[in-house]
Structure formats: structure tokens, C-alpha cells
Amino acid sequence: MKKLILKTLLFLSPFILFIGLDLFILPEDFFHYRQLETLYVIKMSDKLPGPYYPNRIITRSVEGALGYRTPFAVKETVTWITDRYGYRTKDRDLNHYDIVIVGESDIYAEKTDQENLLSVVLENELHASVYPLAPSSDELKNKFLSLKRFHDNPPKLVILARNERYITSLKDFLNLRPPQNNQYIDLPLINNNLLLQYYLLLDRFHKSNMLNYIKSRSRELTGTRPMYPHVNDELFFDGKSILERIETVDINYVHDIALTLKKYKESLNSLGIEFIFLPIPIKENILFAKLGIPTQPQFLRKLITELNSMGVTTIDTQKIFEESTKQSSAVFHKDDNHWNATGIKVVSRDLIEKIRKGKMLSRF
């Protein structure tokens, strides 16, 4: 029996050694090409309050999600900072935020430096506190209002940012009220440092960083790694196919989506919260000509027109991105499908103007 145990330990010793190196010796981001892979929570999502490991600062050279480790990759030095809740924002001891941005990857903007994030730009220009609740979803009910800190101290303004790719999946509900049973843990649970470290260690173990790194390099060597559509050095997430799908959306359905967003506005207004919808065009939309598509996609333009007619405050990002592109100012990363610092900057101007003109931060 002892010999069997000894043989088993000897057999497993290389694996134990590799795991030990990954968890206790090597830096957290050693096997990753960007901070997103290092910090996102995969197994302990029911134990940790946010999507990323809390209280982290990582600065490194990164490549875009579409072009990493390819000739199309564009390296940039990016800093990521997460707060005590595990969201991409600097940590602050605040009970109330003036603005909460509910959104997805465009809001945490993985390849954009911390100082150029939309939340930081708005905060600096408006001299207001801004919280980026991302990644989240269009379900404000289940992500925003279910969090005790926002329920007890609601912001003056909620900005719902939605990528054009996912606008058609907006969910309709009549009453935007928090769920009866809050499924999200409170901050005091992770204030126990030993408990927090235990959760993070378990999560890192489940990620199998070294194993996944080896698998990824093997796919490169065998030529089985998928390649994203590209035109010269410009990479696209979907290519023509996404425009063909979006452009088939019936005009009546566009009206239904606008009605859903109007209900979001009315429900938040009933809670004393202002609402702005921020649609974010996809790269395929703005750079349609590069894909050989003869006419400009119209889905987002139709939706913005419909929302304006319903009195829903909306940012015309379609027009803003088109004008910036005509002036030869790229609003997207070449090796990524998300907007870059320029895209964020040009949109923030209109957003700030709408907030100031509407006195959205001073009327309460």
C-alpha cells in the first residue's frame, strides 16, 4: 500500500509542482496576454461580489482580443485597476455615486488604459462620481437594483450602454424593481482577508492557467487556431454576417425595442433616477465599406430616430462615429472589436453635453 502511494505521488509530482508554481511562485498574469484573463472570476462567482479579482493593479503590454500572437497584433501598455467589489475602477469609500454606467465589454474596455475609460472621462469632466457596473447586462433589475449599495443609495443617473450586436436581445419587463431575494453577497463577507484569499486561490486553481497556455500554444503550432475576418490589418469579430443578421430586423421590431427602452426610462424615473441610452456601433457597421458592403447599415440609425421620437435621451453614436471616421480618426482598435480611447472621447463629448443641458445631476 505504501509503495502504491509512493508511486502515485511520484507520478503526480510534476503536476503538483506545476500547479504550485502557478499558484504560489509565478505572477498572476504570467500565462495570460491581457489582464482580463488574469482577473475574471470563473468558479467563485457566487462567493465574490464582482466579475474580477478585487483590489488589483496590473500594468502590462497587451494585444487585442482578435489579433493576439498574430502578425496583426498591436501592442499597447495598459493599466487595470479593480476596486474592493471587483469592478474596473479605482477603490473608493463612497456610499453614493452620481452616475452608474451599466454595460458590457465596451465599458470595462479591456484594451483601453484605465485613465481613458468612459467612466473616468465623465468623472473628470463632470466632477461627479461615476461607477462602471460592467460587465453587466440589459437586465437592470437583476444586476443594478439587486445590489444593496445602489438600492439604498440610488444614483442620480443611469447610463445603459449596449453594443449594437446585442441590442436585439434586450429583454422586456413591465416593472423595474429589485428581486425579492438578493443573490449577491455583501462586501463584509470578503473583508476577511484569509477567506478572500482562499476563494481567489480556488478560482485560480480552476482556471488551469498553465494547462490552457499549453493548449493554446499547441493550437498555434498545429494551425488549428481560428482566425478572425480581416481586411488588410483591420480585424473584425464577425465580418459581413453580423450586418446581414442585424439589417433583417423588421421595422416593427425596432419599434418594440424602442418601447422596451422607454419602459426602462419610465421605471427608473419612477425611482427618481434619470436615464440615458448609449448604443455602441459595431466595427462592421462603421467600417462597412472595408468589408465590400455597398450601403451603410440602417438598423442603429432607425432605432435612434425611434427613441428620439419617444423622448428617450439617446446618444447618436452612429453619427458621431461616422463623422470621426470621415476625419480619419479611428474609433476602434485595429486588432480588437471594441472602441478605443478616441472613440470614447468623441462619444463622451455628446454625453457630457446631454447631461449638462438636461441638468441630470443637479435636479435632485
Image: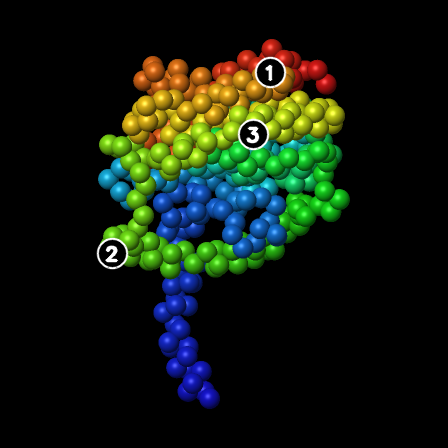
- Image coordinates of residue 258 in percent, x first then y, are 59, 25
Location of mark 1 (residue): 309
Residue 127, can we see it?
no
Q: Is residue 32 left or right of residue 252?
A: left
Looking at numbered disc 1 in the image, what kind of residue is underneath it? Ser
Of 119 and 343, nearer the camera is 343
Q: CA distance from mark 2 to mark 1?
A: 54 Å
Residue drawn at 70 percent across, 25 percent down: 266
Q: Is residue 75 left or right of residue 249?
A: left
Mark 3 vs 1, N-terminal side: 3
Q: Quadrant of residue 178?
A: top right
Location of mark 2 (residue): 222
* Disc 3 versus disc 1: nearer the observer: 3
Residue drawn at 53 percent across, 58 percent down: 202
Q: Is residue 130 left or right of residue 69?
A: right
Looking at numbered disc 2 in the image, what kind of residue is underneath it? Thr
For the residue labelled by badge 3, is the local secondary structure a helix, a strand or a loop?
helix
